[in-house]
Image (tube, coloured by chain):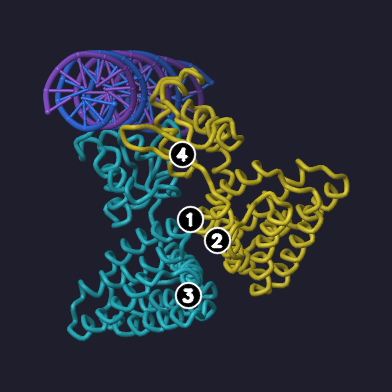
Chain colours: A cyan, B yellow, C purple, D blue
Amino acid sequence: MNAKNVKEEVTDKYSLRGRVFHRLREDILSGKYQEHEELREVTIGEELGVSRTPVREAFRQLELEGLIQIIPNKGAYVVGITDEDVRDIYIIRSRLEGLAARWATLHISDEQLEELEENVYLAKFHAEKGHLEQMFDLDNRFHEIIYEACNSKMLEHQLKDYHQYVLRIRKRTLSSAARGPKSNLEHEAILEAIKAGDADRAEELAHQHLINAYKNMVENGLIRLSDDDKRL
Amino acid sequence: MNAKNVKEEVTDKYSLRGRVFHRLREDILSGKYQEHEELREVTIGEELGVSRTPVREAFRQLELEGLIQIIPNKGAYVVGITDEDVRDIYIIRSRLEGLAARWATLHISDEQLEELEENVYLAKFHAEKGHLEQMFDLDNRFHEIIYEACNSKMLEHQLKDYHQYVLRIRKRTLSSAARGPKSNLEHEAILEAIKAGDADRAEELAHQHLINAYKNMVENGLIRLSDDDKRL
DNA sequence: TTCTGGATGATTGTATACAAAGATACATCT
DNA sequence: AGATGTATCTTTGTATACAATCATCCAGAA
């Protein structure tokens, strides 16, 4: 899941293979296809109205992304995403977001800083009004700005990939409204740290921000966790 | 998941697509194909004596691995990797390796621990003898054991992805022999921390281990770095 | 009964044919 | 000359035909 830029991702969606790829990823992450379910090339092809060729190519990519497992001459099986995976994704992402916030502190542009401030200001407004959809979008954008500001092609791409996962998880669970204001305060604190040029603090705050988001999901019973929480 | 994985990787190599995939990866990593060079489906197919179909599937995978860039309806181009990318990869991986070492401390099995100890012991031997190839393999295996021991499908997958890049960089630069013994000592320290159940220390040591490896490359002039090193 | 072996059908692996998009070269117009 | 349109060629995108492999089932022997 590595080097592709935004432009390709877009054009990508206009090829049949691209559509199959994105659609299948959606459907696997959303839970339409159960874990261990077998995906047949012709069946998927018929469902999406394409032949086996683009399906096969999409399968190979999904395998590399770890979403399906292909056993040669046998078939493709959905790997699925467990609650443990969700936990790990959040923790991994929390570390990388911390790193991104650190680097953003070093390299953020005036324009980006301004957009962050506007973002925080607007989010406060929509939180008071209870506009869930706008809060959702602003939250995404806040993180995206940080990714862009960190000035690292590798890290940005990595985090945007994970964002895909996180979006799906959120869709699956529906984010809790109560988390909004707290999340906003945390965004504000991260912004302040970046403005103050305090990279250590920015990293720690961004890291904790993601951990809090995850904990909130657990507390609300959206994700259940069997074993120890030592990983956090 | 391990024994099975190995078997698949092997069977993989007996399919035409698998052969094309592995062969192309080799050739790109070894520098046979220059940066920005265009890879044509028929040409590659003729070279390897196969049709376009397996070549295309291999291309899609190589794209996800970040080794080539596919521009729709145009062609596939070998992707370059800048010194800044190398720096970011090492830093990102250093954080994730730290996390992996932390989790490995919590979840490592007796067998894995034993293999780690054997690995460290053997590495010392080969370092004294100056067996570069064996040291290289043992080093890779050391990290792989940690990945497997961390007991996280997501993190393991992530780190193995990055490993691709690192292998590529190493091949490009040739690792310096002088680093060997120091690296071994660091491995040993990581192992001790894991055995002692000290997750914090394991994380910090593993993190620093990667940073040291990177610094060594810079000091030996294998990698040039233009701007500030504040990112470290 | 239980095991073996082969016929049969289903599914993937590969090759190839055809369609569509981009690149090139040249003629034409201003 | 420089710009523009177009014919043509090259290359990729997709569909489909055929080959190879795997799974299933049932007959027949121990």
Q: Secondary structure at mark 3?
A: helix
- Is residue B114 rendered to the left or right of residue A45? right
Vertical comparison of B32 with A230: above or below: above
Residue at figure coordinates x 42%, y 30% from the top left: A73
Q: Which residue in the structure is indicated by mark 2? A: B92
Query: What kind of residue is marked 1?
Result: Met
Query: What kind of residue is marked 2?
Result: Ile
Do marks 1 and 3 both belong to one polypeptide chain?
A: yes
Which is closer to the viewer, label 3 or label 4? 4
Q: Name the spot of residue A58 as percent of width and height, x first.
A: 34, 40
Label 2 environment density (alpha carbons within 10 Å; few <14, some 14–19, many ≥20): many
Q: Earlier in the sequence, mark 2 or mark 4?
A: 4
Q: Which residue in the structure is indicated by mark 1? A: A154
Label 4 environment density (alpha carbons within 10 Å; few <14, some 14–19, many ≥20): many
Query: What kind of residue is marked 4?
Result: Ile
Query: Alpha carbon of mark 3 to alpha carbon of mark 4: how far?
Result: 32 Å
Q: Which residue in the structure is indicated by mark 4? A: B68
Query: Alpha carbon of mark 2 to alpha carbon of mark 4: how far?
Result: 21 Å
Q: Which residue in the structure is indicated by mark 3? A: A207
Specify the subunit that label 2 lies on: B
Residue at figure coordinates x 58%, y 34% from the top left: B26
Q: Name the spot of residue A53 as percent of width and height, x first.
A: 31, 30
Query: Alpha carbon of mark 1 to alpha carbon of mark 2: how far?
Result: 9 Å
